[in-house]
Amino acid sequence: TSKTDAQKADAKAAILNADFRRAVYAAYSAHAVEAITLGEEHADGVIRNTLVPYTFAMTTDGRSYGSIVEKYAAELVADYEGIGHDAWYNPELAKTFAERAKEALGDSVSEWPIHIDVPVYAASENQKNMQLAMKKSVEDAIGDYAVIDLQFLEGNSSVYYSSFYNMPTGEENSIDLVFGAGWGPDYGDPSTYLDTFRPNYEGYMAKSIGVF
């Protein structure tokens, strides 16, 4: 990172604020990112609003995991749209969240916008272009509050994963936001995805992002 100590402290304070995190999430256009490799016409086809892919598992009578999720979700949320719909992208709402975060943080942040470090696997042209699209969508929506500083990591994939996934604890992490996992499902039950969030530093992702 090229951030000053003050910028690092500002980023930490902002990231710990729930409204700031909501602002960044609402400013992220999954459609814009996926369109880089799939094109505008097919970009929405891979968007889902569930942790587990819809087709990950099937019941013995031929129903997909996703169809079961939709059935029960629709009973809870009448207009639920689980796949092919970017449910969280809302630039105007992102600004509202960002304004709320700035007001709440007050003097604990010395300077706006907040600089957010994001690692990028430089050897992959697709990933570079997808992260540039992510940067544009976030900054177009809340550029007065957040700036995405892409960190292009040269070398093989181990260099990239060592910046976040291979870190034993969140304290040792040197990035602020990451669009990668380093993990894949270990068995054919949807519950395998919950292994990423297990407590006490057992979760494959939770341990590296500092949740526990």
Image (spheres, rainbow, N blue to C red):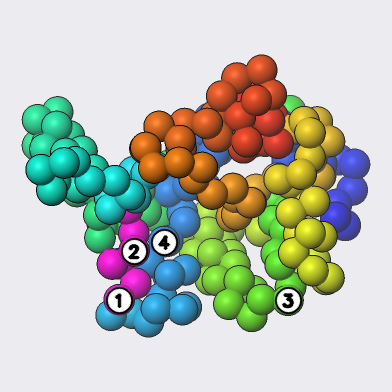
Local packing at callout 1 (Cα closer than 10 Å; few below 14, some 14-19, many 20+) is some
Q: Is 8 left or right of 20, judged from the image as shown?
A: right
Asked if labels 1 and 2 touch by Cβ distance under 8 angstroms, the answer is: yes
- Between 207 and 173, the one lying in front of the other is 207
Q: Which residue is under mark 1?
A: 42
Q: Earlier in the sequence, mark 3 or mark 4?
A: 4
| Mark 4–mark 1 CB contact (< 8 Å) | no
Nearest to N terminus: mark 1 or mark 3: 1
Residue 65 shows in the view:
yes
Residue in the image at 34% along x and 59% along y: 47
**Circle nearer the N terminus (4, 1):** 4
Q: CA distance from mark 2 to mark 3?
A: 23 Å
Work out whether mark 4 precedes mark 2 in sequence or the reverse, and give the earlier one. 4
Residue 68 magenta-drawn? no
Q: Is residue 43 magenta?
A: yes
Query: Which range is magenta?
Result: 42-49
> What amino acid is at disc 3?
Ala
**Mark-to-mark CA distance, 4 and 1:** 12 Å
Cα separation, mark 1 vs mark 3, equals 25 Å
Q: Which residue is mark 3?
A: 123
Q: Is residue 103 visible?
A: no
Q: Nearer the viewer, residue 49 or 113?
A: 49
* Badge nearest the viewer, 4 or 1: 1
Give the residue pinned by disc 4. Answer: 30
Find the distance from the CA under tag 4 to the CA under tag 2.
9 Å
Q: Image height check: is 55 above or below 52?
A: below
Q: Quadrant of residue 143?
A: bottom right
In the rendered structure, which amino acid carries the disc numbered 4?
Ala
Q: Which residue is mark 2?
A: 46
Q: Please rate how many residues cluster around mark 2, counting C-alpha atoms within 10 Å: few if below 14, some from 14 to 19, many from 20.
A: some
Disc 2 versus disc 1: distance between alpha carbons?
8 Å
